[in-house]
Image: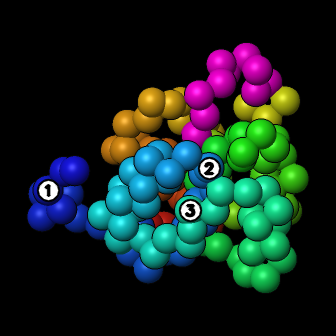
C-alpha cells in the first residue's frame, strides 16, 4: 500500500459500495478505497444482497465485479445507473465479452492496480456529480 502521507485521500467522505465475491480482491479494493478516504459499504458477495442494499440506500459511488458468485451483475449495474451512481467495473473477463456494457461503465481489468482503480473511480465521480472528490 502506498504511503497515505504522499498520496492524500481523494474520496474523503464518499460512501462507496463494493460488490465483489472474491474475499482477497474485496479486501484489496476495500483497503485502496479506505486509503483514498472513502467509507466502504461491503464488500458484498451476492447479487441478491447487492440488490437488497440498493433498495435501502444510495451509495455515492460503486465498484462492481461483473460476476458475483456465478450471477451476472447486470441487474445491480442497471440499478446503479438508474440511481446515477458513478460506477467502475472490475473484472477478469476479456473486454470483448463485456461489449454490451463497455460504453456505459469504466472497466478495470483484473489483476487490478489499486491506484488505477482509484483514478478511474475519481474520474467516474467527476463526470457524474458536481461534488468532485478532493
Image quarter (top left, top right, bottom left or bottom right) of the C terminus: bottom left
Residue matched to label 1: 3
For mark 1, give the secondary structure. Answer: loop
Mark 2 neighbour density, 10 Å: few (under 14) some (14–19) many (20 or more): many
Distance Cα–Cα, label 3 vs label 1: 23 Å
**Colour treatment of the image:** rainbow
Q: Position of residue 76 (x, y in %)?
A: 80, 56
The residue at 73%/31% (across/down) is 102
Disc 2 or disc 1, which is closer to the eye?
Answer: 2
The residue at 81%/73% (across/down) is 52
The residue at 42%/71% (across/down) is 38
Front-lying residue, 9 or 54: 54
Is 96 colored magenta in this rendering? yes
For mark 2, give the secondary structure. Answer: loop
Mark 1 neighbour density, 10 Å: few (under 14) some (14–19) many (20 or more): few
Which mark sits nearer the N-terminus, 2 or 1? 1
Q: Position of residue 20 (x, y in %)?
A: 60, 51
Distance Cα–Cα, label 2 vs label 1: 27 Å
| Callout 2 touching callout 1 (CB < 8 Å) | no
Residue matched to label 2: 21
Which mark sits nearer the N-terminus, 3 or 1? 1
Which mark sits nearer the N-terminus, 3 or 2? 2
Region in magenta = 90-99
Residue matched to label 3: 43
Mark 3 neighbour density, 10 Å: few (under 14) some (14–19) many (20 or more): many
Determine the image quadrant of residue 3.
bottom left
The residue at 71%/46% (across/down) is 68
Determine the image quadrant of residue 113.
top left
Amino acid at each position: 500500500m502506498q504511503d497515505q502521507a504522499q498520496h492524500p485521500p481523494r474520496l474523503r467522505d464518499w460512501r462507496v459500495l463494493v460488490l465483489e465475491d472474491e474475499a482477497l480482491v474485496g479486501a484489496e479494493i476495500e483497503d485502496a478505497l479506505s486509503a483514498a478516504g472513502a467509507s466502504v459499504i461491503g464488500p458484498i458477495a451476492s447479487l441478491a444482497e447487492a440488490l437488497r442494499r440498493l433498495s435501502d440506500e444510495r451509495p455515492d459511488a460503486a465498484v462492481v465485479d461483473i460476476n458475483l458468485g456465478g450471477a451476472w451483475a447486470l441487474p445491480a449495474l442497471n440499478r446503479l445507473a438508474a440511481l446515477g451512481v458513478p460506477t467502475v467495473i472490475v473484472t477478469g473477463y476479456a473486454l470483448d465479452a463485456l461489449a454490451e456494457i463497455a460504453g456505459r461503465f469504466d472497466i478495470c481489468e483484473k489483476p487490478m492496480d489499486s491506484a488505477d482503480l482509484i483514478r478511474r473511480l475519481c474520474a467516474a465521480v467527476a463526470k457524474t456529480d458536481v461534488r468532485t472528490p478532493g
